[in-house]
Amino acid sequence: MIDFSMKELSELIKDLNIVTHIKCVLYDENFKPLYHYEMERSGFCSIIRSNPEYYERCIASDMQGFKKCTESGGACTYKCHMGLYETLTPIKSGGLTIGFILVGQRIGASDYEKIKKNIESFPEKDKREALYRELERVRTVTDEEIESMSRLVKICTSYIEMKKLVSRRDAPTKQLVEEYIAENIRYKIDIEALSRAFGMSKSSLYSFSVKNFGMGISEYVMKMRLEKAAELLLSEDLTVSEISSLVGIYDTNYFVKLFRKKYGLSPKKWKNTQK
């Protein structure tokens, strides 16, 4: 379990936001946003994410950056699928990553025309003009500025670690694994990243899962996805396609096949039997 001293952390994120004039976001170790000073997403990103296909591309970009940062153990700067820069810096405790600070989004000095071309391919023609206007509001930065921002954020994460503004509370590993999977159920759960997060080899994680959950870790992740899907079917007025995406299975036909195998019926028919 992770404890966040939100009063001090929110002040620090606010200061970073004011100094850099770029959105800064505090995330937990599962890449769940906890705080950002400007409470609304940038207009450019909001429009992009209004399209379901492009929303999934945004999520994939975020997860790739998250994975890159986790694997490297240090700050990493990457481009999203539209060509905007973002920088992730890990917050650590005892060698383990327990949170992140993201600085973004911004445009590299030579990338403006490339991003305009990416906008041309956006499928909703009526929103392209709005995207061009919002692009003008995104800050353009030099390579030197990007490096300086990265160093500044690294100083802030060192301060956070020194002051223990984010700390890990001891809890049973079984509980921590369950929470990690539950909080990331809509994303691809990388077994290698999961192994590193809990200080186990992949073979040790598999053995741990069999001992504690009665099955291998990949099988357990899928079990949790399907149980969450059943919960959503009963509690939310969502389509089967929407539910499959919310539990991290992006092929709806494959999701229906897995659901029928576990529950004996298609999602819709199973839902009707529960009334």
Image (cartoon, grey):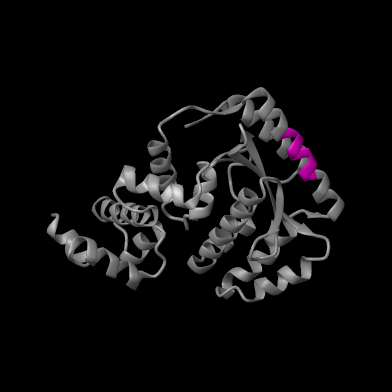
What residue is at 17 percent from the left and 65 percent from the top? 264
Residue 122 percent across, percent down from the top left: 60, 73
**Part of the protein shown in magenta:** 149-156
User: Splitting the image into 4 quarters, where does residue 268 fall?
Assistant: bottom left
Is residue 244 rendered to the left or right of residue 159? Answer: left
Please tell me how many numbered marks the rendered image carries.
0
Query: Residue 262 at x, y = what percent?
Result: 23, 61
Q: Camera-side residue: 96 or 228?
A: 96
Asked which quadrant contains residue 58, the reply is bottom right
Residue placed at 39% from the left, 48% from the top? 207
Q: Main secondary structure of the magenta part?
A: helix
Residue 35 rendering spot, x and y as whole percentages: 58, 37
Q: Is residue 267 visible?
A: no
Does residue 249 sit above or below 274 in this rendering? below
- Looking at the image, residue 270 sits to the left or right of residue 206; the answer is left
Residue sitting at 48 percent across and 52 percent down? Answer: 202
Residue 153 lies in magenta, yes or no?
A: yes
